[in-house]
Image (cartoon, rainbow, N blue to C red):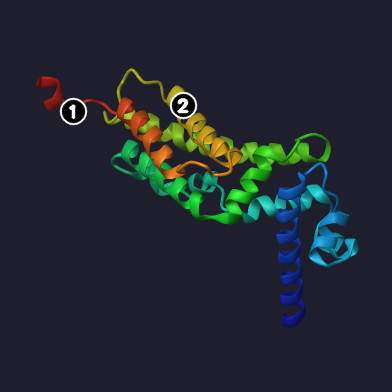
Amino acid sequence: MRRTKAEALETRSVILDAAEQVFFERGVSQTSLTHIASHAGLTRGAIYWHFSGKSDLFMAMHERAYLPQRVFLESQNLLAEDRPLQALERTMRESMRRFAKDERAKRVYSILMLRCEYVGEMESVMCTHREGEDHMRDVIQTAFTRARAVGEMRSDVDPQTATNVCVGAMTGILTEWLRRNECFDLIEAADMALGSLFTGFRAMDRSAKAA
């Protein structure tokens, strides 16, 4: 029984690896389960034993990758920090650094953003992806709201606007980096953008005001 279960898990992993590669190379709309099965050296029946169809397979591939939004799904401690603005900036920088080193995350994010049309059966995939993004936005906005409440962030900065700016900056940098085949330093660009943004958000300390 253990061997059978282990073999099933191994086959599932092989299918997901094949799907990542073929979706990345061909694009999602131009990829069939036959293409994936051929790449994996399996039959379509083997794929259907593990997945109900292409969208189910795509969702499993998406869930397996550690995408930047996952950091915020697991960031309960972020909202308990005494200095939420500082913690948020650190978390965002760390998520970019992790992403830059994660080949699977880069490949899956490229598929999501650059190689998929979210129509028909893939529409539900985008809905699920957006749910994750919405949760990420909620965490970021809550951190900004707390930062303003404790005086760490400027009182004239709206948390929702700050969230839109930060998410837009992160998404834009990641997408452009992948679209241009990683031709610039992602960490340098992210640090520059986030550094400028958070400097603008941060409240001036009293000693600086007095000077």
Please give the name of the residue rendered at 75% of the width and 59% of the height, measured from the top-left corner: 18
Mark 1 closeness class: few <14, some 14–19, many ≥20 residues within 10 Å: few
- Residue 195, disc: none
Residue at 84%, 52% in the rendered image: 53
Residue at the top extreme?
156
> Residue farthest to the front?
183
Residue 147 in which image quadrant? top left
Q: Position of residue 97 (x, y in %)?
A: 44, 49
As drawn, is 22 to the left or to the right of 163?
right
Q: Dots 2 and 1: beta carbons under 8 Å? A: no
Which of 185/100 is in front?
A: 185
What is the three-letter code of the residue carrying label 1?
Answer: Asp
User: What residue is shown at x 78% (from left), y 51% (from top)?
Assistant: 56
Q: Can you give x and y, in whole percent of width and height, for residue 175 in the image?
A: 57, 37
Q: Which percent across, then down, holds residue 180? A: 58, 39
Q: Quadrant of residue 20?
A: bottom right
**Residue bearing mark 1:** 205
Question: What residue is pinned by disc 2?
Answer: 165
Q: Is residue 21 left or right of 211 when viewed as pictured? A: right
- Quadrant where the N terminus sits is bottom right
Mark 2 or mark 1: which is in front?
2
Q: Determine whether, in the image, residue 199 is placed left or right of residue 138.
A: left
Badge 2: few (under 14), some or many (20 or more) residues near its Cα, within 10 Å?
A: few
Q: Distance between the residues labelled 2 and 1?
A: 23 Å
- Front residue of 42/59: it is 42
> Does residue 107 appear to the left or right of 118 in the view shown?
left
The image quadrant that residue 166 belongs to is top left
Q: Which of 141 and 31 is in front in this view?
A: 31
Q: Which of marks 2 and 1 is nearer the N terminus?
A: 2
Quick one: SS at disc 2? helix
The type of residue carrying mark 2 is Val
